Image: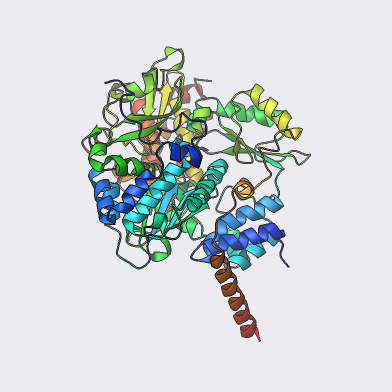
């Protein structure tokens, strides 16, 4: 199957220079889905989404329909959209927020109607200056167009949406930390249980938290039906998905491809997608779903891009970011940089995460920069095992949130896959790739 | 007496009115303070505390959690170079080292003329244009040392000021769109704030 055969669900408008404007949005069928949704019962809209089997696109891959059904009935409930996008090498929501803000806004209105909530917040990472501007402008236009505010399109349904800027904290992507940020506090993840914000979320009220891309799929699902969405992909992985491809590829970028029907090899090598590795060097390893995910080797290139396919091989599709390392990339340096990120971004509440991340980072630093010892490998594995006992995937949790247990995946994978490289670093007391 | 300029003060009150609880406006208000003062100033902290019904210590403690907030003055242009995984593989560390030489300032510090502060950043979600460089949180997409140098020259001469405003990630939101807050919401919020103030004054008597 040719890679680009599938319909473009969330990127259909991006060929236009002015894809972010209301005029272009309306000219390309915008807000028709909302009108259709408003003509249905809220439960019917939710049923379509359930039938679509839309898996959350933020990282955990939880079915959106199921999450919605868990919303505790209450006078006050909220919808919160997660646009914090800070998982390293993930840059798909950035594209949706800047280039098609109305699609996002329409998706949010549809979700709010299905859930019958009257207040929604779109949390965008503070670094998205243009995104904040575009989404606010889209909201203003939607109000003027009658798609937002009192009595949306004369349906009797009312909704206000506020766009909320974050301020530079990876951990605020974790949904309970995000809610803390939205409440004006430090972004400390909340202790579970309660496990789901749908039971107890913003200000303690029931709250649905969904990712930007998840929301952006809704207009298409409402217009074309949940069955049409579920007909794409295979198994639990339905529809299309945005993959942010980066690292050692000729054409880094964000690509929408049908789930499961394509493989990592297609994504990396297809001329219309990644276009191969610079200088035709061999792929040495790749990270399939954000830096929290365990790495894969070249023997897994033919794995289909599906949630269970990747999950079954001991990693995860996660945030939809794929990073390619070739034979010129140093595995030790890559793993060190990832640990440095975690040790900087640990919120500090849990000892294994706060202390473990810094300790691993220092050991990795000295291996990469000269000063490493053979014993450091055992030390590292021991530290990893203390943060995530058993080093299984998904990891066992010793901490409040899963940032902590995500720290070992890259170090552990790098040692397993490239032990020789570690030893060469010790031998030469420096980086052989320098 | 308000420390925030009249227009920013008005915006701040609008922001508070947007949320079910005033404290929720904390992050956007701190962005406004930073926009005016270039950093999160002590006077700004006091005003945010007043607006959100918290204490200055609470505001400072919250602000210090977030990387975008500078609790000390920084240069007029904050240059960020990402060295996280995608940028690392595209030469981010080398570009950061080049930037430090070019600007003649260590990573994390400010040039003597107060024009530039150089920061090493975590992933900025623009990894398709790696290594990623931002100036005052605008993606400038200069991935080579030569492009970086040309960009710095332009910024220094003020030729990029139209697209790279001073600090404050919300500057252009305000300039180009404005917030949409129903008048009655703002009126209700003002009345509530006034009543709260009156109660406080009585309590103090
Ligand atoms: C450390 C950490 C960081 C996260 N960062 C993000 C993020 O930047 N964006 C996002 O949508 N979800 C992120 N998530 C996942 C959210 O907690 C949550 O599952 C998601 O927003 C739910 O939306 P979805 O069901 O539509 O995927 C993160 C989770 C963790 C543990
Ligand atoms: S695991 Fe790390 S980031 Fe998560 S709550 Fe604990 S200390 Fe904070
Ligand atoms: S890794 Fe540098 S912008 Fe994403």
Q: Residue furthest top?
A: A279
Residue nearest the observer in this picture, A154 or B119: A154
Residue nearest the observer in this picture, A319 or A74: A74
Q: Is residue B82 above or below residue A350?
A: above
Q: Position of residue B125 (x, y in %)?
A: 50, 37
On the rendered structure, is A367 left or right of A393? right
The answer to whether any part of residue B3 appears in the image is yes
Q: Position of residue B127 (x, y in %)?
A: 50, 31
Which quarter of the figure is the N terminus of chain A placed in?
top left
Q: Position of residue A241 (x, y in %)?
A: 34, 34
Q: Is residue A75 above or below residue A401?
A: below
Residue nearest the observer in this picture, A272 or B143: A272
Q: Position of residue A74 (x, y in %)?
A: 33, 67
Q: Is residue B32 above or below residue B47?
A: above
Res A385 → quadrant? top left
| Residue pictured at 68% horizontal, 29% vertical | B151
| Residue pictured at 70% horizontal, 46% vertical | B74
Residue nearest the observer in this picture, A329 or A26: A26
Which quarter of the figure is the C terminus of chain A placed in?
top right
């Amino acid at each position: 199957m040719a890679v680009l055969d599938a319909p473009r669900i969330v990127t259909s408008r991006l060929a236009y220079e002015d894809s972010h404007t209301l005029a272009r949005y309306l000219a390309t069928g915008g807000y028709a889905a909302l009108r259709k949704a408003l003509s249905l019962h809220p439960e019917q809209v939710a049923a379509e989404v359930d039938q679509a089997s839309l898996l959350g696109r933020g990282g955990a891959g939880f079915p959106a329909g199921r999450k919605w059904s868990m919303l505790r009935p209450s006078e006050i409930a909220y919808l919160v959209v997660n646009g914090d996008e800070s998982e390293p090498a993930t840059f798909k929501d950035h594209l949706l927020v800047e280039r098609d803000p109305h699609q996002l806004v329409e998706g949010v209105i549809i979700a709010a109607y299905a859930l019958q909530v009257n207040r929604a917040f779109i949390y965008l990472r503070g670094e998205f200056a243009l995104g904040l501007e575009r989404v606010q402008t889209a909201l203003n236009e939607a109000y003027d167009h009658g798609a937002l505010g009192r009595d949306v399109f004369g349906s009797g349904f009312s909704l206000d949406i506020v766009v909320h800027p974050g301020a530079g904290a990876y951990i605020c992507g974790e949904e309970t930390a995000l809610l803390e940020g939205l409440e004006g506090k430090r972004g400390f993840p909340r202790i579970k249980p309660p496990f789901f914000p749908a039971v107890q979320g913003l200000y303690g009220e029931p709250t649905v938290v969904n990712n930007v891309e998840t929301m952006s799929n809704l207009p298409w699902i409402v217009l074309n039906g949940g069955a049409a969405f579920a007909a794409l992909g295979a198994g639990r992985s339905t529809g299309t998905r945005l993959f942010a491809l980066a690292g050692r590829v000729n054409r880094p970028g964000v690509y929408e491809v049908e789930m499961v029907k394509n493989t990592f090899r297609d994504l990396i090598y297809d001329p219309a997608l990644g276009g191969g590795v610079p200088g035709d060097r061999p792929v040495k390893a790749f990270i399939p779903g954000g830096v929290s995910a365990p790495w894969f080797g070249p023997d897994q290139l033919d794995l289909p891009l599906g949630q269970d396919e990747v999950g079954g091989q001991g990693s995860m599709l996660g945030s939809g970011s794929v990073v390619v390392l070739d034979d010129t990339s140093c595995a030790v340096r890559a793993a060190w940089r990832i640990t440095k990120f975690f040790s900087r971004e640990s919120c500090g509440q849990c000892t294994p995460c706060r202390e473990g991340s810094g300790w691993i980072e220092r050991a990795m630093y000295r291996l990469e920069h000269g000063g490493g010892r053979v014993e450091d490998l055992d030390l590292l594995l021991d530290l990893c095992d203390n943060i995530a006992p058993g080093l299984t995937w998904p990891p066992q949790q010793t901490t409040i949130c899963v940032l902590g247990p995500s720290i070992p995946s890259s170090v552990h994978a790098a040692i397993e896959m490239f032990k020789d490289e570690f030893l060469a670093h010790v031998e030469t007391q420096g980086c052989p790739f320098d | 007496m308000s420390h925030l300029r009249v227009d920013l003060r008005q915006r701040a009150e609008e922001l508070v009115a947007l949320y079910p609880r005033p404290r929720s406006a904390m992050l956007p208000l701190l962005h406004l303070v930073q926009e005016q003062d270039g950093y999160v100033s002590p006077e700004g902290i006091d005003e945010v505390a007043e607006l959100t019904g918290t204490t200055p210590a609470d505001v400072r403690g919250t602000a210090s959690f977030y990387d975008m907030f500078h609790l000390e003055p920084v240069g007029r242009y904050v240059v960020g170079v990402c060295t996280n995984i995608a940028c690392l593989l595209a030469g981010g560390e080398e570009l950061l080292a080049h930037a430090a030489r070019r600007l003649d300032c260590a990573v994390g510090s400010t040039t003597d003329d107060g024009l530039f502060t150089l920061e090493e950043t975590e992933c900025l979600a623009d990894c398709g244009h790696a290594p990623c460089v931002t100036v005052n949180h605008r993606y400038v997409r200069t991935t080579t040392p030569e492009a970086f140098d040309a960009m710095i020259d332009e910024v220094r001469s003020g030729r990029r000021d139209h697209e790279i405003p001073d600090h404050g990630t919300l500057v252009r939101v305000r300039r180009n769109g404005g917030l949409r807050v129903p008048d009655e919401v703002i009126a209700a919020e003002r009345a509530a704030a006034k009543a709260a103030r009156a109660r406080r004054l009585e309590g103090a008597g």
